[in-house]
Amino acid sequence: MHSRYRALAIVSALVVSLAAGGSAFAQQKGGKVDKAQQAEIAAAIKIIDDALNGQAAPGDYKFSFVCHPMKAADARTYVPFLLTFEKGQVLPPAAVYYVRVVSKDNLAKAKKAMADHEEAVRKAAVAAKLDPENTELADEEEKVRAQTPKVEYAFEDFRNINVAAQKDSLFVLPLMMAVAPGEYDTYFLFKEPQASLKNKKQPAKASVVKVALKVPDFTTPEFGTSSIIVTRMTQPLKAAPTATDFARNPYIFGNMAVLPSLDFKFAKADELTVLFYIYNAGLDKAGKPDVTVDYLFYQKIGDGEKFFNKTPALELNAKTLPANFDVKAGHQLNGGQGLPLASFPEGEYRLELKIVDKVSGKTKTESVRFTVTP
């Protein structure tokens, strides 16, 4: 049995701006924000500093994190992500957002450097105290104290957020970061602005969520894929996306913006859209890839599953790709499709993606689980 499907012919060069996309944090580094904004940034930084140093973090708002790493234009990894706020809570109409990404390796080195610095300060202070007439020792103590080591952060971003959400609705905030592959502790802050407080002595409501983040390395030559995104919500763009478009919504594929599914539940009337990039496919003599993608659907039956359906193999080669497709120009190979679910009985399914590189002979298999509801 075959289902009608819609191939997503997307050719794009994914260019990621590693700056904060015009955010107030980037401007603050250039000294282009007013005193009120500087105060907001300073307050946000202090809350995260305290959390980083082990102090109890505020938890006035409940939200969670999900990300979909992809290959960037350089050695770093592009990480679009969603912050999803639980229903039933009252969010401020305007909010402050700040994220700090800390490399676990750099943090360990910084802590050792801080311990070494404290010991050096102790020794210099003892030496100066034992010989108080020696001004050189006093100068040396002052010099050592000034050499305080600092933690280098992999990524920081500060933004003012307009919140359009009712108490009984789900608020989803799409954002991004771009970092080198590795393991990180990521601190997300969401808070009401200082300026909105009627009682300036009362602390602003805020929440800090700490996430252990492992960022994959897409710079290796291995045949593979980006994160697999499934969605029912797609929106065509009227023009080629700009850096500003990516700052507003990092989930852009070619000329289409999407919102990834959070619950993986789809109605029979929905179209299941699957999006992902294929990396490091071999190239034929003409410099084109030759890849097939099979979409195989399995329905859950009791504790097992049975084959339900498949689409015709999606072929990505010199005959089917746009004439201007050029890997050297940064174009990425997209294996996405749109699949109507009208013929799917209600129930739980597993979509198996079998990706075959005919040039190299390599195969990659990925799976996504979803549910069809009435």
Image (cartoon, rainbow, N blue to C red):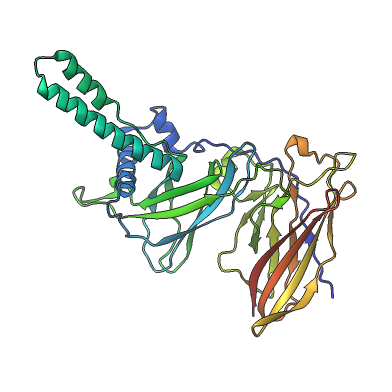
Residue 4 makes an appearance in the image: yes
Q: The N terminus is located in which quarter?
A: bottom right
Residue 59, quarter of the rendered image:
bottom left
**Residue name at image x 77 percent, y 77 percent:** 308
Residue 103 makes an appearance in the image: no
Q: Is residue 135 left or right of residue 235?
A: left
Find residue 315 and report its horizontal and vertical position in percent.
85, 55
Q: Is residue 125 left or right of residue 81?
A: left
Number of numbered callouts drawn: 0
Viewer-nearest residue: 17 or 360: 360
Viewer-nearest residue: 39 or 237: 39
Q: Is residue 202 left or right of residue 41?
A: left
**Residue name at image x 20 percent, y 25 percent:** 124
Q: Is residue 271 left or right of residue 248?
A: right
Find residue 226 and report its horizontal and vertical position in percent.
66, 52
Find residue 341 and report its horizontal and vertical position in percent.
72, 72
Find residue 345 and report its horizontal and vertical position in percent.
71, 81
Above or below, 355 against 184 in this view is: below
Q: The C terminus is located in which quarter?
A: bottom right
